[in-house]
Image (cartoon, rainbow, N blue to C red):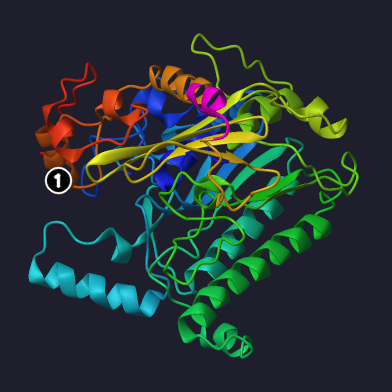
């Protein structure tokens, strides 16, 4: 499970080991607001590993802040190649042309999807399809790092298959068995990721580091439902708090340490900060407790790392908040202002059979746990759009009192709700 069904908050949680809701980062950063970013009092995994003697690099998407104090090179990364925003076009010839035209028109806030890439803060002149370019840069980082006696940490943050949906013609042509042209193009973007991972693995082998390198592969959130993604058998997708929104594919590969097998228990993206820090011999004691935990012994001994622990998720939507929580085999869900539902995941991974009426006590107990978790949240320090901001002000969102009512929330009641967590957000 990632910590949020949206990319920016999910990536923030991965690098901090904490739910983004705890420090006001539970929504994507708005474009053209360099004063917003993951608070600098939050320690990143990259900083901890760098202090332990690791060479640290990030290639690809950042989306954790564009201001000088928020960029990768100020957050523990020695090397950065990529872009700072939420998304980017994939073909340089196209986005460079569009960027030049925007500059010529005198646009002040040019779309970040067409701006030049950055190499350690300097403009980069890219010529390759973006996914292939990131794979190239990742391989070069591995090659350079292998020449040093110091270990390395690489955060290879592909943006594919994030929109815009753009794929190479050769990759599209290789998937003639997919009849839906939109699905075929989407899948072709994934083919480029597969190719890139293969290139990185081959570079590790050439550098003699493959056997003793831990590779973790995962997504930041579920695929966007209705946009050619398929999260089956899970229900929902990006932004949803059903399993399809934040339960993602993940594997770990370390030939010297891990036997090939399937791990049947929940693993959290939040767990990687303390787990990798421990493996690196770093001191992870912090004044502000991590939400993840060191799960290495559980992984190697096939134990559940999170027995009797709440795995919470919350996604603020337009006018309301979706929330859910897993406790062992059970999960409660509130989505789209519908009544709270209860699901038994081992027998209903698709969350199709609401058994709340059969287990009312369990339902109430688990909703109470999710509410208690929500009490640790801060108000968002930003929202993605000015429209969202105005809506939050108008409706006094997130009106948690209504979110955790056991009856269906009424929209008119929500407007009158005087919740203690009243939110006022300013976007200049």
Location of mark 1 (residue)? 386
| Residue range highlighted in magenta | 358-364
Q: Is residue 426 left or right of residue 155?
A: left
- Estimate the x, y position of residue 308 in percent, counting from the top left: 67, 21
Q: Is residue 366 above or below residue 249?
A: above
Q: Quadrant of the N terminus?
A: top right
Decide if residue 287 is in sight here: yes
Q: Is residue 217 above or below residue 270?
A: below
Rendering coords of residue 281 (x, y %):
74, 21
The answer to if 91 sits in the magenta stretch is: no
Q: Label 1 crowding class (10 Å Cα cut-off): few <14, some 14-19, many 20+?
A: some
Residue 324 vs 147, above or below: the answer is: above
Number of numbered discs on residues: 1
Residue 426 in view of the camera: no
Give whichever of 64, 425 is nearer the camera.
425
209 on left or right of 193: right
**Residue 374 figure quarter:** top left
């Amino acid at each position: 499970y990632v910590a949020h069904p949206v990319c920016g908050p999910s990536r923030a949680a991965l690098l901090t080991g904490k739910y983004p809701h705890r420090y006001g980062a539970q929504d994507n950063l708005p474009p053209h607001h360099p004063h917003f970013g993951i608070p600098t009092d939050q320690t990143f995994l990259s900083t901890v590993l760098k202090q332990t003697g690791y060479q640290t690099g990030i290639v690809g998407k950042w989306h954790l802040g564009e201001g000088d104090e928020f960029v990768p090179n100020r957050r523990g990364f020695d090397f950065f190649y990529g872009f700072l925003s939420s998304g980017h076009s994939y073909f340089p010839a196209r986005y460079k042309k569009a960027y030049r035209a925007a500059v010529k028109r005198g646009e002040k806030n040019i779309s970040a999807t067409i701006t030049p890439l950055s190499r350690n803060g300097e403009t980069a002149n890219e010529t390759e399809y973006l996914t292939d370019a990131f794979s190239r840069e990742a391989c070069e980082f591995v090659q350079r790092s292998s020449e040093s006696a110091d270990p390395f940490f690489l955060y290879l943050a592909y943006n594919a298959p994030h929109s815009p949906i753009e794929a190479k013609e050769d990759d599209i042509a290789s998937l003639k068995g997919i009849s839906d042209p939109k699905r075929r193009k989407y899948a072709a973007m994934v083919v480029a990721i597969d190719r890139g991972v293969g290139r990185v693995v081959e570079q590790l082998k050439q550098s003699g580091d493959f056997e003793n390198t831990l590779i973790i592969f995962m997504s930041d959130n579920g695929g966007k439902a209705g946009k050619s993604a398929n999260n089956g058998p899970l229900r929902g997708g990006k932004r949803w708090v059903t399993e399809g929104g934040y339960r993602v594919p993940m594997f770990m590969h370390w030939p010297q340490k891990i036997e090939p097998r399937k791990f049947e228990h929940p693993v959290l993206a939040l767990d990687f900060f303390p787990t990798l820090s421990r493996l690196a011999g770093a001191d992870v004691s912090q004044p502000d407790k991590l939400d993840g935990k060191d799960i290495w012994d559980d992984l190697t001994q096939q134990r559940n790392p999170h027995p009797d622990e709440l795995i919470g998720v919350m996604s603020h939507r337009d006018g309301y908040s979706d929330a859910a929580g897993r406790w062992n085999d059970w999960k409660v869900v509130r989505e789209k202002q519908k009544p709270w539902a209860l699901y038994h995941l081992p027998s209903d991974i698709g969350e199709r059979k609401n058994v709340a009426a059969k287990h009312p006590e369990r339902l109430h107990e688990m909703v109470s746990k999710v509410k208690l978790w929500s009490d640790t949240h801060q108000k968002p320090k930003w929202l993605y759009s000015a429209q969202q901001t105005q809506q939050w002000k108008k409706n006094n969102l997130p009106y948690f009192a209504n979110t955790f009512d056991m009856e269906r929330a009424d929209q008119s009641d929500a407007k009158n709700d005087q919740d203690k967590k009243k939110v006022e957000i300013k976007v200049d």
